[in-house]
Image (cartoon, grey):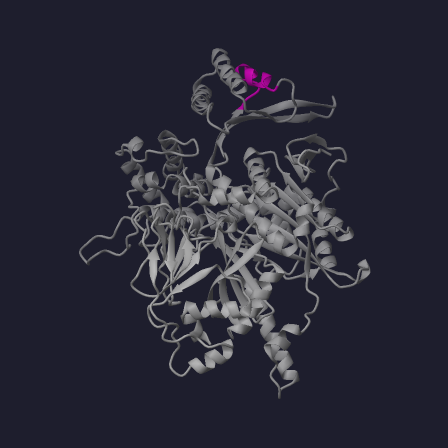
Amino acid sequence: MQCILWDRRIVGRMLDHLGVPTPRRVEASRDGGPRIPEGFREHVEGRLGFELPQNVPPAKVQLREDGNAIIVDGVVIEKPFVEKPVSGEDHDVYVYFRDGKGGRKLFRKVGNQSSELDPELIAPRTDKSYIYEEFIDVDNAEDIKVYTVGPGYTHAETRKSPVVDGVVRRNTEGKEIRFITRLTDEEKDYAAKICQGFGQKVCGFDLLRCGNGAKSLVIDVNGWSFVKGNESYYDKAADVLLDISKRLMASPLRALSISEQAKTPEAPSWKLKANVTVFRHADRTPKQKLKYNFPITEPWAQPFVRLLNGEREEIILREREQLETIAAAIEEAKSLGAIGEDLGKLSALNGALFKKIDLPGTKAQLKPGYKKDKSAGTRKLEKLVLVLKWGGEFTHAARYQSRDLGENMRRDISIMNKDCLNNVRIYTSSERRVTASAEIFAAALLTPSPAQQQQQQQQQMSSGLGLNVPPSPGFGASQYTTGGPNVASPTTVSSQIKEQEKHRIIDKIQQRWCCNDEPFLFRERWEKLFEDFCDVKPEKFDPSRISELYDTLKYCALHHRTFLFTVFGESLEAESIEPKDKESPPPKRKLHELYSRAKALFDLVAPQEYGIEPWEKEEIGVLTSLPLLRKIIEDLETARNSGDCSLNLYFTKESHIHTLLNLVLASGLPIANPRIPELDYCSHLTFELYERGTATSKSDREFAIKLSLSEGAHSSNVLDSAIDARHALNVQGRKRLTSHLAYSLVIEKLSKHFSRVPDVGFPAEPQTTIAHGFTGVRNRAGDASEDISTWVYDPSGGQRQ
């Protein structure tokens, strides 16, 4: 029966016969009518239940005088209309617009292009047979790809319609970005009819929704098709095949019909009851800092002591007026006799402060250290540390990542259990990049507007840790700076590039700069890295600088790729790395070489920042993320014991998601893959609570927890990743850490960490803040290292609890 899909005229007649709605259409045949391979006509007509026309006379086709309609044998189709070749293998489909505004030519995807605008496309083609359909104004500028495995199972995905702008959105693996969607009962009925009527158990077809979901129309049937890159689809397909096999084994003499297969009841399946997810914030600018220790016994250090203003805990200065008090303290310290090396440090601090005072994210931390006087029962100031920090700010790419992540989660939760969206709590730590990620995510998750979504799709995009864990013995600097016989060390590569950069006119390489960056900041950032890697003795090399090198490489590759490649002497052209002939030298690959070595070193060093030995990882996890783990378990227990579904989301920084994952790995749960990937921006760890059972009694219901992890907006080679003006990598899907585990087992294993420190939960009387549609609650986290803001969705849009 696959042969009937080769002619769109037969497909249309078959859909009409099955009662599946399609757009209004008219056929303009010039080849005698639908063609069936010799010997198949009788079989096909018997399957269809009607005869196919033969020897159809050529259609009379004309364009109406005003040019806004086509007339085929007296039937009028108004513009805009769609012109399709009758051959199912011909994908050159044209859309004609009204009032002489041209049209759009659709074709098989070529790279990232699926259609192009043609202002001269006015008159329809006359070279062969065509079908003319009414153009459907679809919901959300999306079409739907539907896949069946037998009449009882369907999988559906939405994608951006090629009619919008012809640009194919792809992920970092080069695959088209699609989103799983739920079909209505009526659409599932269409799928079953198509599967049975066309004789295609494994079948794909295209669907359009219009009128805000009020109407669905099938526009094409593709036949044998599979879903790409979705494990749940293949799991379900395997279940269907297994079920068929079991039943055939039970009755080996009789094959079951498709209708009998569809009527077989399925065992109760797991249903999502609660989702608890911890997110790392979205993309940020590189973080940089300068650190100064003041000898408080020196008279010239007293102006900095007075900046504490009597406070005994760390204070943070952010505003310009506050930062200017540091500059005043520096001048006073100079006048009080600071000399030699101390004077040089003060001058360097003043220079850095002057340059960075107006940059977003610039702040100073004053950290006093006290020694307890046991005899007097008081504490005496022993040391004072000033840390000047800048960078680490939310980027424009982060806005897209946060928005897309929120939209994707809404789609997923709507499919798994949309009731969870009626009970949402969002928590965020106090860093600005974290709260900004949470705000944009929340808006996309909780308040979607179809009109806004369509506008966003069509518009053109324009635009730590408190402990210092030392390296293990024998883990020396020489291990970081040596390479193979044919690969230069990072020191050599960086030295060569530093020399080359000096001869560039850096302010003319790249005209537009984003993220409040400028050429002098780029140069300053890299010169500091050159100093750390090139101008240091091997025994004094600091392995922690590897993370900053890798972070800076990724940031520049996404936001300033033109400048980065030019400075490193590489071409942005997608050329082969092989020489064109034997005598030609190979292209310069210094940047790629540096990146590959920085990535290898980062993968080695970064996981050890949060502990080297297993007991260290657990100890640091307890000190950093135990309050968060307590809250997660509390959320799961609350959801299990209540009748409501819930969605609890936590936004935090890198150190907390790393250490939380270390606690999970140390708990003894059967983890599918205990190797931790690189946890990039928007990485997230998910705890899903499921229930199943048909009885209403709580004692008869079964509960399970499933853990999964996403590595976030990550690419294995960011230098060669395809990016647009958003400068944003797509967030990777979640990968399973565990199967469905018994609820009691998971709670028992995770709770074993609680005995390590006393319970320091969340206070009972939070302070209320925030925003339209949300209730803001500021709670104090157990380890007192950061504030937690809670946003509770309020559908009324104004009520505050």
Magenta region: which residues? 294-308
Q: Residue at x 73, y 34 (%)?
A: 801
User: Which corner quadrant of the image does residue 465 belong to?
Assistant: top right
**Farthest front residue?**
74
The answer to which of 497 and 731 lies nearer the viewer is: 731
Question: 584 and 47: which one is in front?
Answer: 47
Task: State left or right for residue 520 relative to residue 258.
Answer: left
Residue 667, horizontal then vertical, whole percent? 67, 54
Q: Quadrant of residue 514?
A: top left
Of all residues, the one furthest to the bottom in this rendering is 253
Q: Is residue 386 visible?
A: no
Residue nearer the viewer, 173 or 570? 173
Which percent across, then down, holds residue 671?
Answer: 61, 59
The location of residue 213, given as percent across then percent down, is 57, 52
Inspect the magenta stretch and tell me whether residue 307 lies in it. Answer: yes
Q: Is residue 560 above or below residue 28?
A: above
Q: Does 449 lie within the magenta span? A: no
Question: In the figure, is residue 314 to the left or right of 332?
Answer: right
